[in-house]
Structure formats: C-alpha cells, structure tokens
Image (tube, rainbow, N blue to C red):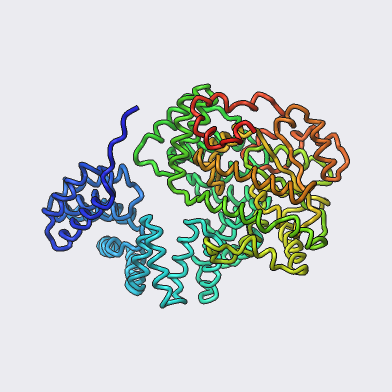
C-alpha cells in the first residue's frame, strides 16, 4: 500500500486562495496566477485554484493555456457551472461563437444564476437572429437583476454545492424578508438536498399560499410529497399541473412516480412507456421502467430496461447497480470491463461512482474475487459516507430517552389507551435481516395484505417532535407522557386511515419499516393490539450484508463499520428494553431458524399473529405480489441455505466490524 501524502492545512490554502482572488479583483492577474500555480503543486484538483489559474490566464491573453487548464478542470469538476462559463469567455475571445454558445448553455444548465453567461447568450443569439432564444436569455438577465443580491448569491452557493453557506445566507435574509417567495423556495430546495423534507414541505406550502399559480414551486412541492410517501396528495398536486400542461414530461413523470408509490405499477409503466416514445434516449425513464418491472416480478424485462439505461448513458451508475441489486444477475466480461473503466474515470460524478463501486463489489463477489470485491465495497461506502449527515449520537440518545420514558409504569398507567383495532403487523429490526422473507410468508396468507416499508410511524414521530426539533432537548419521546387518552386514540386512528390507501380490504396488513423498532413504545401506545415481529439475523451476517447494500434513501448508518456496529448494539439494547417492559408484545424470529425449519417457524409466526395455518405460507415464493426491497428476487425462490455464512468469505477484512460489534459479535 502506498503511504498517504500529508494534506496541506485547509486554512492556509484558503488564505492563499483569498489572497489570489484579491489580487485578481485589483487586475493584478500575473501575481494572482503565480500564487494559484504554486498552490496547484499542493492541491492539484482544488476547484477554486484551477478556476483562478484559468481566469488569470484568460485576462493575461493566454487563451490556449487557459483552455488547457479548463480541460484539466473539467476532468475533475465536470458539474461546476463557472467552468463552462469560463470556456465560453475563452471561445468568445478568439471568435469561436458556436463553441462559446455551447459552453454558455452548459454553464446556465448547471447554474442558472450566472448572469454573465445569460448576457453573453442574449448577444450571441441576437447576432444569429434566434429571437426566441434571445428573448429567453434576456428574460433571465432581467429576472436575476430584479432579485435581491442575497438571494442570487445564496442560490449560486447552493448550485455550487456550498449548502451550509447558502442556508445561513438565505436564513439571514428571511429574518428581515420573511415572505420572500424565492428565498423560501430556495430554502426548501436546500432542505430537499439535506433530506430535511418536513421543512421543505412546509416552506413550499407557504410559497403556494402567497403564489398559488407558481408552477415550478408546485412541481417541487409535489416532488417532496412523493419523497415523503404522501402519494395521494402528490397525485392531487400533479393533476393540477397536468390540467395546465397535459404534455409536460416532468409533470407526467412525477405522476408516474406517485402511481408507483401507491403500488399502481402498471399505471406507472404506462406513463413511463408513453414518455419513452418521445424521449427514447432518456436513461432515467429506462431505469424507472426497470424498477417497476422488477417490483412486479418481471425480471427479464427489468434486466433489458436496466441494460438500455446503461446503453444510452454509459456512466449511469444506478443502471449497473440496479442490475447487481437483483442479486441474481451476473455481469458479462464486457460489462464488467465497462463498469471498471467508468468508475476509474475522473469525470464520473460522485453519485455515479459510488453506484458503480457497489455494482463492482457485487459482481466480483459473485466471481469469488473477494479481496477486490471488498476494496470496491469499501470504496463505495467511503464515497457515500462523505455526503452523509448521519450522527450515531442522536440514535443512542433517543434510545436512552425511550428507556427513561417508556417504562412498565408508563404503560400500566395508560392501559386501555389507543385504537383497539388489531389490523397492523409490524416487522422491525435491521435491514437485510430476513424481514422480506417474513413479509412474503405472511402476505401469502389469505387474511394478510403485504404493503411496503410505510413511512407513517416516522411521520407521526415528526409531528410529535415538532418542525424545528431542539437536538439538545428533543420533545419526543417525552411528549408521549403529555398526550391524553383521546389524543392517543386519534393518533392510532390516523395511522390506520393514512395507510388505507395501501390496502385492498383484507383484515390484516404488514408495515415492514425496519426502523420502527425505535418506536415500539409509540406503536403500543396508539395501537395496543398490533403485532410486532423482530426480524433478527446473526450479527456479522446482518451487519456485513448492510455494508454491501447501497440503499436508495435512508439507512445512513450502513456506510461505515463503526456506525453499523454502534447501531446494531443500540438496536439490541432497545429491543431488550421493549421485551422487558412489554412482555409478549414482540415475537423474535431468527432468520437462521427460519431457513433451518421453515414449517415450524411459519406455524409459530402465524400463531403469534392469531392466524390459522395455510399451506400457501410454505410456498411463499409462488405468491404473486409487488416486492420493492433488495430481496425482491430472492423471496420469489425457495429458501436456500448457502447464503447464511457468506460473510465468512470476507472475514480477513472484517476485524473492524467485529470490534465495532463488541460483545454482540458472538451474540
């Protein structure tokens, strides 16, 4: 292994960058260039340094050098808008108008606040008689000129990836301009990027109160509703947009996504395929079609759609990961070589890169090349972890608070509270612990509805917590002690009403959101007759399986061994507490036992749920239903035992995970 090179202190580098910027503003470009070029020796991929070098070279008339710098710049920062603006300035300086137009268009596609690019496009379009494009560019220049400078600057920071600086600036602005529509919308966009979706939803609702005809804000609002699993409401909002623009592809795509969220996958497929007629090169559409087909169990068609997505966009990491995530797909030599090449290309985006890494990890694992497979899993997790905001301390503190609040005495004092309906069966635990198998077994019963990982309990927690939770003094779970009998019953009834959209009339239904183990106290309080099943798996097998899995969203604890180990220990601690204060409430189902004795465990699960034995539950793989999780293809096959100890193939590299699990390693 090559020894890591010492990294220059960020504060000194930033100070030198600021000094070079100051010189450039004074027109002293030779001095600015000298400083920036010296910095390149220490931080050769630094975005700000490369930008300063290119700008200084252009102002010094060294256009050829500037273009070479920009080509180097593009290889490592292909999504930076100002890079393409600088390309445009250089091409325009040497009279290459067509190349300049293309570069400026790329610039504003990435950062629509670049007024200099819009102004240049206005003039270049006008010179070619492109009246519509000229008017469009002029309108953007006028819009930017009307906006407060703080909002334009904050938007620019946001589009350049400086999320926290953008958030601070726009929040300061809103303190004195509380009803500024664009500022609220921008703060919502930042919230979406940071996955603070409840705030984003509230802000966009507020924007629409002030500006009900603002289509872009309504579209973003409907998108947030989809992300928050509020699918019926999202369809309602999307229909408002479609009434105005029935052929708008973005609105139609969003409508399809909402249909898929509701389980109306055939409707979603129809929408996506209609859109594909007009946009056959749309990789995202091919991917969405693949996801719908996978969920419906149509694997061969799903594979073809995923391959098509990769064909039209060869660096599309999600397409390759979707193939790998089928768990049954095997990459060809040609595909494997393509994935390796794309992952190694510096211009590949971070999101594509970690998708490609996880795909390579799975492909190489299937070939028995475990050392290289682990390197890619480790690399993919490191990339994903770099953009995560996960804090293990918050989960651990919530566990302590749950134990303090939800005691035997707490529940004894509230006996008889809640909605008494027995409909829900909650399956909780960690992901990759066998919950999908349990769900498929239960959903094969004539009295049980299989749904999905429902977001309704977490949504109730958000409501109880409040819109702006104080991390130092959170309201939840202490707020549970403040609820009276009527309020508690109303929460249970609201849960049942909100989940009705996923049901088709059977007496019982499954909610398999794994993270609900943290809220069993709330669940018992509002739904005392609901059943809870703890899906558990051998710790190393479960935790390493999570490390190998790239989740579409959430489960941020899975991207480092330390976080996984801490989370698992917290989970075991809290489940022990629930078993102590609510004896008999939770049935623990060990995955390895189910594999070893299927019928015995099926009968045990059905008895716990108060259900008569039905032979169909033993032939769960024959049940035709939508399955969305990573195990969707595996639960459509009979149980096989070979996968139980797969983690041992990687044991030479799993010492840190064993250490993180501590005493749970041998549990």
Q: Position of residue 106 (x, y in %)?
A: 34, 53
Q: Is residue 188 left or right of residue 630?
A: left
Which residue in the rendered view is the most extreme toward the right? Answer: 612
Query: How far across and how far down the image is residue 235, in percent?
Result: 63, 61
The residue positioned 78% from the left and 28% from the top of the image is 597
**x, y (%) of residue 194?**
48, 56
Please, which residue is most extreme toward the top here?
368
Evaluate whether residue 266 shows in this view: no
122 relative to 274, above or below: below
Residue 551 in which image quadrant: top right
Residue at image coords 16%, 59%: 24
Residue 606 in view of the camera:
yes
Which is more toward the observer, 488 or 263? Answer: 488
Q: Is residue 342 placed above or below 416 in the rendered structure?
A: above
The residue under the point 65% across, 51% down is: 518
Seen from the viewer's position, the closer of residues 460 and 107 is 460
Q: Quadrant of the N terminus?
A: top left
- Residue 349 placement: quadrant: top left
On screen, residue 633 versus residue 64, left or right, reads: right
């Amino acid at each position: 292994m090559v020894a890591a090179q010492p990294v220059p202190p960020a504060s000194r580098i930033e100070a030198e960058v600021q000094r070079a910027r100051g010189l450039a503003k004074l027109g002293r470009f030779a001095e600015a260039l000298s400083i920036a070029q010296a910095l390149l020796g220490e931080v050769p991929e630094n975005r700000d340094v490369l930008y300063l070098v290119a700008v200084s070279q252009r102002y010094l008339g060294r256009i050829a050098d500037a273009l070479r710098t920009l080509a180097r710049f593009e290889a490592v920062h292909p999504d930076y808008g100002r890079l393409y603006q600088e390309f445009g300035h250089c091409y325009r300086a040497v009279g290459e108008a067509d190349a300049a137009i293309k570069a400026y268009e790329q610039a504003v596609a990435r950062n629509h606040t670049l007024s200099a690019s819009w102004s240049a496009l206005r003039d270049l379009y006008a010179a070619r008689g492109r009246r519509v494009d000229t008017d469009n560019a002029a309108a953007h220049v006028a819009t930017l000129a009307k906006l407060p400078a703080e909002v334009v600057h904050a938007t620019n920071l946001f589009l350049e990836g400086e999320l926290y600086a953008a958030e601070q600036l726009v929040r300061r602005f809103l303190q004195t301009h509380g009803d500024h529509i664009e500022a609220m919308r921008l703060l919502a966009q930042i919230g979406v990027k940071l996955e603070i979706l409840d705030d984003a939803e509230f802000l966009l609702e507020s924007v629409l109160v002030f500006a009900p005809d603002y289509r872009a804000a309504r579209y973003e609002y409907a998108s947030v509703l989809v992300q928050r699993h509020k699918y019926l409401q999202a369809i309602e909002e999307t229909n408002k947009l479609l009434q105005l623009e029935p052929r708008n592809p973005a609105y139609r795509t969003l409508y399809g996504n909402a249909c898929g969220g509701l389980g109306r996958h055939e409707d979603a497929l129809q929408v996506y395929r209609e859109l594909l007629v007009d946009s056959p090169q749309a990789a995202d559409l091919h991917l969405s079609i693949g996801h719908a087909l996978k969920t419906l169990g149509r694997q061969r068609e799903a594979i073809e759609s995923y391959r098509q997505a990769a064909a039209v966009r060869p660096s599309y990491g999600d397409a390759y990961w979707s193939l790998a995530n089928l768990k049954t797909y095997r990459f060809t030599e040609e595909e494997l070589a393509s994935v390796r090449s794309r992952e190694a290309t510096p211009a590949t985006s971070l999101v594509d890169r970690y998708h490609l890494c996880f795909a390579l990890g799975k492909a190489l694992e299937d070939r028995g090349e475990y050392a290289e497979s682990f390197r890619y899993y480790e690399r993919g997790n490191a990339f994903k972890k770099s953009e995560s905001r996960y804090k293990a301390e918050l989960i651990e503190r919530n566990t302590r608070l749950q134990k303090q609040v939800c005691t035997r005495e707490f529940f004894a004092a509230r006996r008889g509270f809640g909605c008494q309906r027995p409909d829900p069966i909650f399956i909780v635990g960690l992901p990759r612990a066998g919950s999908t198998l349990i769900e498929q077994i239960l959903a094969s019963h004539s009295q049980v509805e299989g749904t999905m990982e429902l977001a309704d309990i977490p949504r109730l927690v958000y409501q109880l917590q409040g819109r702006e939770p104080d991390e130092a003094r959170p309201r939840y779970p202490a707020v549970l002690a403040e609820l009276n009998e009527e309020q508690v019953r109303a929460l249970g009834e609201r849960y049942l009403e909100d989940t009705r959209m996923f049901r088709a009339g059977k007496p019982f239904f499954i909610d398999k959101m794994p993270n609900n183990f943290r809220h069993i106290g709330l669940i018992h309080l509002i739904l005392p007759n609901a059943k809870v099943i703890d899906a558990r798996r051998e710790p190393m097998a479960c935790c390493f399986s999570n490390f190998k899995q790239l989740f579409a969203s959430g489960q941020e604890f899975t991207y480092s061994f330390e976080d996984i180990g801490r989370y698992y220990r917290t989970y075991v601690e809290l489940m022990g507490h629930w078993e102590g204060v609510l004896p008999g409430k939770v049935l623990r189902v060990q995955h390895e036992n189910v594999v070893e004795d299927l019928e015995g465990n099926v009968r045990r699960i059905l008895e716990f749920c108060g259900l008569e034995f039905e032979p169909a539950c033993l032939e769960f793989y024959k049940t035709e239903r939508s399955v969305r999780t990573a195990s969707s293809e595996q639960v459509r096959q009979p149980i096989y035992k070979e996968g139980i100890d797969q983690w041992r193939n990687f044991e030479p590299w799993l010492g840190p995970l064993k250490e993180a699990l501590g005493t749970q390693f041998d549990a």
